[in-house]
């Protein structure tokens, strides 16, 4: 029996798997360069399949990039809103997983609890992809790594690894910080998380270096990464804005990083809080490329979980 491939935290990917997915994402992006001029010729490697996309929290980038990406691969995306599903009226995750498994070939879900995702994966027979939970945002990090590879082509290892690069995440130690630490390190990336007391990742939960002082924490970094101070579901917004006030990515902080450092942000942004408008719209950022890369990276990931395209015959590594 073939093991079902999931992406719940991103740690399901071996280094080889991850770098293959990123290589494929670059290839898929190359098919896209004619966007807006001539019709792009996307490989339709998922023709005849359907992918369910459940969003129990708001989304702009993830929803758009997944829906368009699935379509470009020749498959049918089904957008499933919570108020339209019986899940919201008490139908169990177990039964929902069984029904999805009878009709669609993979499901992506954005929800609060990681446990719901795990149950969906355990009770169904199709791949489950995490489109953001309170704990993790692995799809985001696939795009982030792709963007780093594009920004630093001469600093990559022979296999495309990011072993020579240092990313410093500045701000709230949240789902995005955790995924950067977990998934980035699989690709060899050195990740630091710079956060005040009370907002830091737990010591030892990831391979990230944890620190508190913004200027010292970003020293020598090739990339400064920002995310919102108030994530979806956080209720203590005023408190957070006070605690995180010194943890914004600004030109001054970029000056304290390594030479040629770039800024990334998963978006949505709040200019003047976690990132300055000068950085967000300036020439040291790769943020808008990063947002586009969501689609290319997720398309490659879908091929990987569904064993399609270049992954059709590859055994891969799945725990
Ligand atoms: N970065 C990200 O996941 O954006 P959305 O919340 O808009 O999907
Ligand atoms: N940490 C943010 C990421 C948004 C893409 C959140 O969970 O709301």
Image: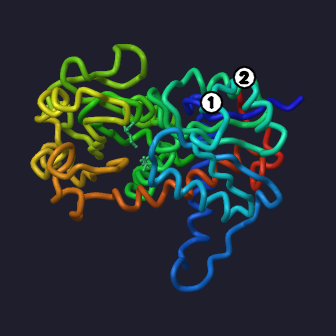
Q: Is residue 196 or residue 65 the one in the foreground?
A: 65
Residue 308 versus residue 9 in the image, above or below: below
**Which image quarter: residue 169?**
top left
The reply to whether dot 1 and dot 2 touch (C-beta < 8 Å) is no
As helix, strand or loop, the secondary structure at mark 2 comes to: helix
**Which image quarter: residue 46?**
bottom right
Q: Say which mark, if any, is on residue 138.
A: none
Residue at left 59%, top 31%? 8
User: Percent x, y for residue 167?
Assistant: 32, 39
Where does label 1 land, which residue? 89
- Give left or right: position of 26 versus 121: left
Q: Is residue 234 or residue 22 the one in the foreground?
A: 234
Q: Which residue lies most toward the bottom here?
A: 37
Q: Quadrant of the C terminus?
A: top right
**Which image quarter: residue 76?**
bottom right
Residue at left 51%, top 81%? 36
Residue 26 versus residue 114 in the image, above or below: below
User: Percent x, y for residue 266?
Assistant: 37, 47
Q: Is residue 239 or residue 204 the one in the foreground?
A: 239
Between the C-alphas of marks 1 and 2, the distance is 21 Å
- In front: label 1 or label 2: 1
Residue 108 versus residue 4 in the image, above or below: below
As helix, strand or loop, the secondary structure at mark 1 comes to: helix
- Give left or right: position of 214 versus 292: left
Residue at left 25%, top 36%? 229
Where does label 2 land, which residue? 122
- Give left or right: position of 164 versus 96: left
Q: Which residue lies most toward the right here?
A: 1
């Amino acid at each position: 029996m073939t093991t079902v491939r999931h992406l719940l935290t991103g740690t399901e990917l071996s280094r080889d798997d991850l770098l293959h997915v990123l290589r494929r994402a670059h290839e898929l992006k190359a098919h896209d360069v004619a966007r807006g001029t001539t019709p792009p010729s996307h490989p339709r490697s998922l023709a005849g399949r359907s992918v369910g996309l459940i969003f129990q929290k708001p989304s702009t980038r993830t929803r758009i990039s997944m829906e368009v990406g699935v379509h470009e691969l020749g498959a049918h995306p089904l957008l499933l809103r919570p108020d339209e599903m019986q899940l919201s009226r008490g139908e169990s995750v177990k039964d929902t997983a069984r029904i999805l498994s009878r009709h669609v070939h993979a499901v992506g879900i954005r929800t609060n609890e990681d446990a719901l995702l795990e149950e969906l994966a355990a009770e169904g027979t199709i791949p489950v992809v995490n489109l953001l939970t309170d704990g993790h945002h692995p799809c985001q990090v696939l795009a982030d790594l792709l963007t780093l590879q594009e920004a630093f082509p001469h600093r990559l290892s022979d296999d495309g690894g990011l072993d020579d690069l240092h990313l410093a995440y500045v701000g709230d130690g949240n789902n995005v910080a955790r995924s950067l630490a977990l998934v980035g390190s699989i690709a060899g990336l050195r990740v630091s998380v710079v956060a005040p007391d009370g907002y830091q990742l737990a010591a030892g939960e990831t391979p990230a270096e944890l620190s508190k002082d913004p200027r010292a924490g970003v020293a020598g970094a090739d990339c400064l990464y920002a995310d919102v101070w108030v994530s979806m579901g956080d209720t203590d917004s005023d408190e957070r804005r006070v605690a995180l006030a010194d943890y914004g990515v600004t030109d001054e902080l970029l000056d304290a990083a390594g030479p040629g450092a770039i800024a990334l942000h998963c978006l949505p942004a709040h200019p003047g809080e976690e990132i300055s408008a000068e950085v967000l719209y300036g020439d040291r950022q790769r943020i808008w490329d990063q947002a586009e890369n969501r689609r290319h990276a997720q398309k490659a990931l879908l091929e990987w979980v569904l064993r399609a395209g270049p992954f059709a015959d590859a055994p891969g590594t799945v725990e």
